[in-house]
Image (spheres, rainbow, N blue to C red):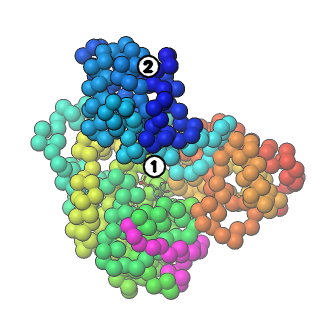
Amino acid sequence: MTSSGTNRGGPPNPAPVGAAPWTAAWELLLPAAATPPRARGRTLQTALREAVRSGRLAPGTRLPSSRELAGDLGVSRGLVTEAYEQLTAEGYLRSDRGAGTWVGGAVRAVGPLARDRAPRPAGVRADFVAGTPDLALFPRAAWAAAHRGVLAELPHHALGYPDPRGLPRLRTALAELLVRRRGVVADAERVIVVSGVAQAMALLGFVLHARGTPGVGVENPGSPEHGSLFASAGIGTVPLPLDDEGLALAPLQASGVHAVVTTPAHQFPTGIAYSARRRTELLGWARSVDGLVIEDDYDGEFRYDRAPVGALQGLDPEQVAYTGSVSKSLAPGLRLGWLLVPASLVEEVVERKRTMDLGNPVLDQALLARFVERGDYDRHLRRCRRAYRERRDVLVAALEEHFPGARVSGIAAGLHVVAALPDRYGPEDRFLGRAAAAGVVVRSSAHYGETAVDGVRLVLGYAHLPPARIRDGVRLMADAVRDHGARREPSAP
Ligand SMILES: Cc1ncc(COP(=O)(O)O)c(C=O)c1O
């Protein structure tokens, strides 16, 4: 690196203190010379643009003269002049004839998204955060075969803009699947393909908001996502308490809401399955206020000790909007799900879906359709259910061994359980802190809105963890608590 590109002239807008890119290695910043001669001009321009956009070249930075930079980079001077002129015309650079070229002030530097910058927790030895299936079980071979099959059979015209309701073939396959597996009332006309439960909630939120619905009831404790999704649609949520049978009826009636989100097959996070009585009462409430029950069937497929409880929607499809996705059954990254709404809402929801994204990607939809039609989805669910049931049993046994007296609930279904530990393990903050220090990531029910809890109540996801990791994680937690003086009583209370 030579000393070219110094700032002797003094930029019109001084570069911020500490941002002294004129000392930067220009040849690293602009690797134009390394590219074939024909591509050099474009490479140089792209690299300069990118350097300005990313903020590596701050506004006000004076660039080297075209002669100096050409010398540094080992390219022709004309190429640099052309790049300066082009970027000046685009607003990235400013030049004062004879005085030099500076980075303009019009470009807002765009750094990586906050999420990308978020530090990854170091030293995590077991992560019990609920909500993810085992992604290592993703059926790659069957998926790849379905992909090849779809590409071979899909007619050209199918690659045009899709029906915003979803590919007819997928809607037919999903209707058949959901009737058979979840007991819903469905035909292809009622099914709307969405990019997950999250989008279903947002769509319903927009439609309800447009209809003047003042607020939507949500389970408390419940998924924090429900609140934020409705908020994004401009609609507030009213947290409603649960009892042993599901959403408590009296507070629902008193709340004045006309729409409520529920997870009746396996309440998130408590894990209770709504009783038959509460299901009937809930539908009675919906009919009496001409309201809407939104059924989030996020993990209803996974029930271990007997057949899954059928969906609420099957009892009254005109009072229930039903939604689910492949996020727990296949992988959340696929972003594919379904929404079945009462006939009176179909048109508005489809129009919202159309204006939101013009429909889901066609290839993905065709792929899932084929996967379902050929029985691959059922096969995959059977395989996962076997694995998850074993992991659940391992977790329950490990909790019994290491936390005697723990009461474990919500074990009949889903991908997580709730463990209430005896008082001696509390207070909860201290417990969580010690678990974290030992490399165990775990959330308490308070994270999901549960209040007035005595002792320690943990929500433990297990489906994504191999059995050995589950055992180790529970043992690590127990050791962390004991090593720091938790009174490990000889027997359960
Ligand atoms: C209660 C609940 N519903 C739904 C989902 C899944 O949403 P999506 O289908 O958009 O991935 C989750 C994800 O963690 C959840 O916890």
In the displayed structure image, the side of residue 487 where residue 67 appears, left or right: left
When asked about the image quadrant of residue 118, the answer is top right
Give the residue drawn at x 27%, y 19%: 78
Question: Pointer 2 and pointer 1: residues touching (CB < 8 Å)?
Answer: no
Taking the image as shown, residue 22 lies to the left or right of residue 445, namely left
Q: Nearer the viewer, residue 247 or 32?
A: 32
Q: In percent of the image, x 45 and y 49: which residue is there?
A: 328
Q: CA distance from mark 2 to mark 1?
A: 48 Å
Mark 1, Cα crowd under 10 Å, few <14 / some 14-19 / many 20+, is many
Disc 2 or 1, which lies upstream in sequence?
2
The residue that disc 1 covers is: 328
State the SS at label 2: helix
241 in magenta: yes
Residue 26 point in image, percent of width and height: 45, 22
Give the quarter of the figure containing the C terminus: bottom right
Residue pictured at 52% horizontal, 62% vertical:
224
Q: Is mark 1 within 8 Å of ligand 1?
A: yes
Q: Is residue 466 left or right of residue 94?
A: right
Judge: label 2 CB < 8 Å from ligand 1. Answer: no
Give the labeled residue for mark 2. 27
Residue 249 visible in the picture: yes
Q: Amino acid at mark 1?
A: Lys
**Residue 107 placement (x, y as % from top left):** 38, 44
- From the viewer's side, name the closer residue of 354 and 250: 354
Q: Is residue 140 visible?
A: no
What are the residue bounds of the magenta stretch?
Answer: 233-252
Q: Compared to 227, does 292 lie above or below?
A: below
Q: In the rendering, at what x and y percent does residue 186 appear?
A: 27, 62
In this figure, what is the number of numbered marks?
2
- Give me the disc on residue 98: none
- Label 1: state its secondary structure: loop
Q: Looking at the picture, how far across and down is residue 383, in whole percent?
A: 46, 40
